[in-house]
Image (cartoon, rainbow, N blue to C red):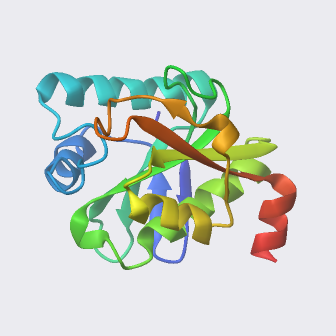
Amino acid sequence: MGDFRHETERLVLRDWRDEDWPRFWQGTNTENVMRWLGGVADETKRKGAQERLLSYEREHGHTFWCVERKEDGAILGFCGLKRSNQAGGPIGMMEAGWRLREDAWGKGYAREAAQASLELAFERFGAEEVIALTVQRNEGSWGLMKRLGMRRREDLDFENDEFDAENPVIIVYSIDKAEWEAVRG
């Protein structure tokens, strides 16, 4: 671990360091950030999430990387790639995902990091298609998916009440390599 690093204009996507985790959880394990992600995580859930993120890197060479702001070294959250593994979902497909602390919302950081992740998916990791998952009521997340050039894939939606018990469906957006190349111009 520790050798992946990808820079954008304002951000660094990189492998996790032990000292990142407390700052990551402090900034992102809040009611607002975790609203559509299963709620504020207790210590057991946090440890499980950390172990999963590190296992993705070991098993596939990519994960939801630590997102650090260049300007001040602040840990803003995570963004990156994994293999979709939600029960009932499109298992094994390349999935882009992000989670940023609330004070980083609305500044274009998620889009910048997600665009970099899509570039990496297609150019470095050989993806032909990348999906992203959310719940219908998480308009901020699927709004970003649309701004990234992703299209709604109702054929890949699946039932799951872990993130929104009132509307227990995970919705899926995707972009293939040709669409991504057209979007990025």
Please give left or right for residue 157 compared with residue 20 in the image. right
Please give left or right for residue 117 compared with residue 97 in the image. right
Q: Would you say residue 80 is visible in this rendering? A: no
Give the residue at x 68% y 66%.
149
The picture quadrant where one finds residue 110 is bottom left
Quick one: 181 or 171, which is closer to the camera? 171
Relative vertical location of residue 101 with respect to residue 19 in this rendering, above or below? below
Please give left or right for residue 12 compared with residue 174 in the image. left
Please state the total of marks drawn on the protein image: 0
Question: Which residue extends farthest right?
Answer: 178
Q: Position of residue 8 (x, y in %)?
A: 55, 70
The picture quadrant where one finds residue 45 is top left
Give the residue at x 37% y 61%.
68
Q: Quadrant of the C terminus?
A: bottom right
Quick one: 39 or 123, which is closer to the camera? 39
Q: Position of residue 170 (x, y in %)?
A: 48, 39
Quick one: 175 or 111, which is closer to the camera? 175
Relative vertical location of residue 146 with respect to residue 107 in this rendering, above or below? above
Question: Which residue extends farthest front?
Answer: 166
Q: Would you say residue 149 is visible in this rendering? A: yes
Relative vertical location of residue 161 with respect to residue 105 in this rendering, above or below? above
Relative vertical location of residue 57 with respect to residue 101 in this rendering, above or below? above
Q: Position of residue 43 (x, y in %)?
A: 12, 27
Q: Position of residue 155 (x, y in %)?
A: 69, 38
The picture quadrant where one finds residue 175 is bottom right
